[in-house]
Each structure stands twice: as structure tokens, then as C-alpha cells.
Image: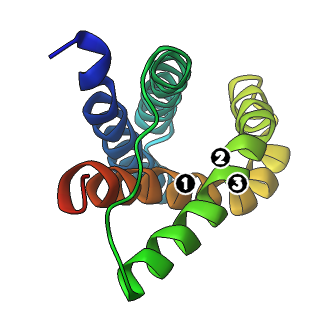
Amino acid sequence: MKIIDSLPALNASLNLVAFILLILGYRQVKAGEVEKHKKTMIMALVASSLFLISYLTYHTLGEEKKFGGDGIIRVIYFIILITHIPLAGLMTPPILFLAHAGLTERIDRHKKLARFVLPVWLYVSVTGVLIYLLLHVMYAK
């Protein structure tokens, strides 16, 4: 097996790590643990950035994978995929604006952005894991 073939599993792992860190960071800020929240969210941003690098590497150098499922699972897979891809592509600037607002302590702006960005970032992270499981594990061709 070539190293490139292991990138989808790495991508899913990075998405899962980002998802867990996002939930943890949300809980920390709600508990008033602002410094812990800041560190956790930076780690989530790093995990998502590493994911993006690995994802682009795989899709530049790797082979296209076809979904092997049929029936309703095929419909579910493609619904997840057609919501995941555009949201993932559109989320980079808002995530960076959110991080910048937090790191520069523009808390009101950070809170307003987070209300929109966090749920979508969570959705993109968890659906990335689901896409991996469906495409590479459960219904691999």
C-alpha cells in the first residue's frame, strides 16, 4: 500500500479530532474557561488545516474512489456529500474571520460569527467522517 492510500483514514481522523475539539472548546467557553477555550480552538483550527493539506494532497495525487452502495444508502451518501462539499469549501474564510476575531479579543464579533460558524464547522467535520466510513469502509468497491 502506498502512503497516499492511507490519507483518507488520516483525513477522517483529523475531522474527528476537530469535531471533538470543537465540542470541548464550546463547553469550555460556556463554563467560563476562556484560556482553555482559546487553546482548544487553536488545536481545532490546526487539525482542520492539517486535514485540508492532506485532503488536497490525496485528491491531487490519489485515485478517485467510487461509492459502492446501492438503494437508499446511495441516496443518503450523495445527500451528505452534496451538502458537505460546498459547505466545506465555503467555511474557510468564516473560520479564519472567527479565529481572528477571537485572537484579537473582539469578543462581540467572535460570538456573532461563532453562532453561524460553529454548527456548520461541526457538520462539515462529522459528515467528513461519515463520508469516509461510507466510501472507504462500509461500501468500498
Residue at numbered disc 1: 124
Instruction: Tell me: residue 133, above or below residue 72.
Output: above
Which of the 4 quarters of the picture holds residue 83? bottom right
In space, the residues marked 3 and 1 are separated at their CA atoms by 7 Å
Residue visible at 32% across and 16% down?
4
- Foreground pick, 108 / 124: 124
Residue at numbered disc 3: 87
Task: Look at the numbered disc 2 and give the secondary structure of its residue.
Answer: helix
For residue 34, side relative to residue 137 (left or right) = right
Which of the 4 quarters of the picture holds residue 99? top right
- Foreground pick, 64 / 56: 64
Which of the 4 quarters of the picture holds residue 89? top right
Say few, some or many: other residues with alpha carbon within 10 Å of mark 2 (under 14 / 14 to 19 / 20 or more).
some
Say few, some or many: other residues with alpha carbon within 10 Å of mark 3 (under 14 / 14 to 19 / 20 or more).
some
Residue visible at 45% across and 48% down?
22
Q: Where residue 56 appears, x then y in whole percent?
A: 56, 21
In space, the residues marked 2 and 3 are separated at their CA atoms by 4 Å
| Three-letter code, disc 3 | Leu
Evaluate whether residue 31 shows in this view.
no
| Three-letter code, disc 2 | Ala
Residue at numbered disc 2: 88
Instruction: Tell me: residue 22, above or below residue 6.
Output: below
The reply to whether discs 1 and 2 touch (Cβ–Cβ < 8 Å) is yes
